[in-house]
Image (cartoon, helix red, strand yellow):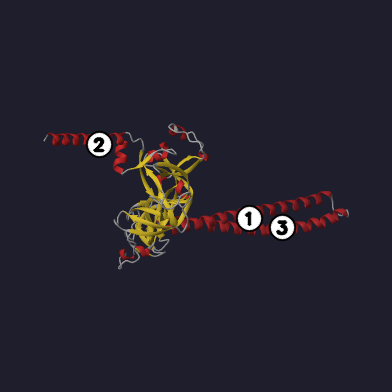
């Protein structure tokens, strides 16, 4: 009995010693817990994401070019119109009166010009007669037939005829200028009268009607006035998005896109880039800082929403101007390429000497031109730095063009360790996410 008791006590002590040994070995493990993943061959599609609003590809804001009261408004919101259809009419009374005044002024100017022309012809005839008399008298004077006084009188008459002809010519020129000015006034008055009739500039649909019959509107030919309505071709719609300056260099005309519209949940539509602005603009970020962005227009392809089109109104798109949309533009594609998770790639100095322990402080001091992209392999329980050349990336993975082979295991987390603390030769051990991030806490 005693012997059995000793065996039991010995067994308990042995278990305790084993537990203590395991606990000690776990707590003396100085390796860094990491996440890891094998480099694999994948397909990568590079995307640029942006948000914006839907708008018609072709639309025209309608504003009056003359002020006045709207006396006719034969259209209504959502009505389809053809180019040249009447949209609105402004009271033309004052413009008709202006045309009448301008035409009367023109007639008066033309009459004055005609009188000036007749006076010029008379002055020319008198000048010819005076010149003939002067020539005859000069010959008689040279021959001593007439006196100096008679010759001087003849010359004075000739000089007066020249002056009268010149004056008549200038008077006609002024009358012609006045007539041209009057003609311009008539044209302007007639144009203003014509502007009281507002017609559709394109085929489309009336949208955003903002005026009513009887309302007074303002406007001039030089500046847009009261916004009355929008005429838009709703058969072709586009998304107007703002792309960050760091992404715009990758976007090209003709790039395919995937569009999500807030109004149509769980549905995506196809698109294509049709226009890229060359001029930048400023946009406020969520943090309040100013971002430099470029406007990009993405056409929504009809074959991707054909089932949503109302067959009774096939000219109307299911999308409405102002709807919110998010766009992913496919800027590049790489098939069957070696790739690793994005967070596995970091930068390190292109040098064989690495500063340990103080690396986090030194990294910010390194010249950016001397930094190279790299990953950390796991070999025999140690981190091995490997410089790589990368290619395109999607939201999760980045292409590795050189420096790695398929099947090699790379450190993928935690990112704070990879980006600054991990160095070549550090002892590492692959753990689960729960173990890694629990230890970080």
Can you see residue 96? Answer: no
Task: Evaluate if marks 3 and 1 touch, with contact meaning CB atoms under 8 Å apart.
Answer: no
- Image depth: mark 3 or mark 1 in front: 1
Residue drawn at x 69%, y 57% as measured from the top left: 123
Residue 302 x %, y %: 37, 63
In the picture, which quadrant includes the C terminus?
top left
Out of 439 and 87, give the one closest to the viewer.
439
Gap between marks 3 and 2 measured at Cα: 142 Å
> In terms of depth relative to the viewer, which is nearer, 382 or 119?
382
Dot 1 corresponds to which residue?
172
Q: Nearer the viewer, residue 12 or 382?
A: 12
The residue wearing badge 2 is: 18
Tell me if 110 is positioned left or right of 45 in this view: right
Residue 437 visible somewhere in the drawing: yes
For the residues labelled 3 and 1, the Cα–Cα distance comes to: 17 Å
At label 1, counting other C-alpha atoms closer than 10 Å, the crowd grade (few under 14, some 14-19, many 20 or more) is: many
**Disc 3: which residue:** 126
- Dot 3 and dot 2 residues touching (CB under 8 Å): no
């Amino acid at each position: 009995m005693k012997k059995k008791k000793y065996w039991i006590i010995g067994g308990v002590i042995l278990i305790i010693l084993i537990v203590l040994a395991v606990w000690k070995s776990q707590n003396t493990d100085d390796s860094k817990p990491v996440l890891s993943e094998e480099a694999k061959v994948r397909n990568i599609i590079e995307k640029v994401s942006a948000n914006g609003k839907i708008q018609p590809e072709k639309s025209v804001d309608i504003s009056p070019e003359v002020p006045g009261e709207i006396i006719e408004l034969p259209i209504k919101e959502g009505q389809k119109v053809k180019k040249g259809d009447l949209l609105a009419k402004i009271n033309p009374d004052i413009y008709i009166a202006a045309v009448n005044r301008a035409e009367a002024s023109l007639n008066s100017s033309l009459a004055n010009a005609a009188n000036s022309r007749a006076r010029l012809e008379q002055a020319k005839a008198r000048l010819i007669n005076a010149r003939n008399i002067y020539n005859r008298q000069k010959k008689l004077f040279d021959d001593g037939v007439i006196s100096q006084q008679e010759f001087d009188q003849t010359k004075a008459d000739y000089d007066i005829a020249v002056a009268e002809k010149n004056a008549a010519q200038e008077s006609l020129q002024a009358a012609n200028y006045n007539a041209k000015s009057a003609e311009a006034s008539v044209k302007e008055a007639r144009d203003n009268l014509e502007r009281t009739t507002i017609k559709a500039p394109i085929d489309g649909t009336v949208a955003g009607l903002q005026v009513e019959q009887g309302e007074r509107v303002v406007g001039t030919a030089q500046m847009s006035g009261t916004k009355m309505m929008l005429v838009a071709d709703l058969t072709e719609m586009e998304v107007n998005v703002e792309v960050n300056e760091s992404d715009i260099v990758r976007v090209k005309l003709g790039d395919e896109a995937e569009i999500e519209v807030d109004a149509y949940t769980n549905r995506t539509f196809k698109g294509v880039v049709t226009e890229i602005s060359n001029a930048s603009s400023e946009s406020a970020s969520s943090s309040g800082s100013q971002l430099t962005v470029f406007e990009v227009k993405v056409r929504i392809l009809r074959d991707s929403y054909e089932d949503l089109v109302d067959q009774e109104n096939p000219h109307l798109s299911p999308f409405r101007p102002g709807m919110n949309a998010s766009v992913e533009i496919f800027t590049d594609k790489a098939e069957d390429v070696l790739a690793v998770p994005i967070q596995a790639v970091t930068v390190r100095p292109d040098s064989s000497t690495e500063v340990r322990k103080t690396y986090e402080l030194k990294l910010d001091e390194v010249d950016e031109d001397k930094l190279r992209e790299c990953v950390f392999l796991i070999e025999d329980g140690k981190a091995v730095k490997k410089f790589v050349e990368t290619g395109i990336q999607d939201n999760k993975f980045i292409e590795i063009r050189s420096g790695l082979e398929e099947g090699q295991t790379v450190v993928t987390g935690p990112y704070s360790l990879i980006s600054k603390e991990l160095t070549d030769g550090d002892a590492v051990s692959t753990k689960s996410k729960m173990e890694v991030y629990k230890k970080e806490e």
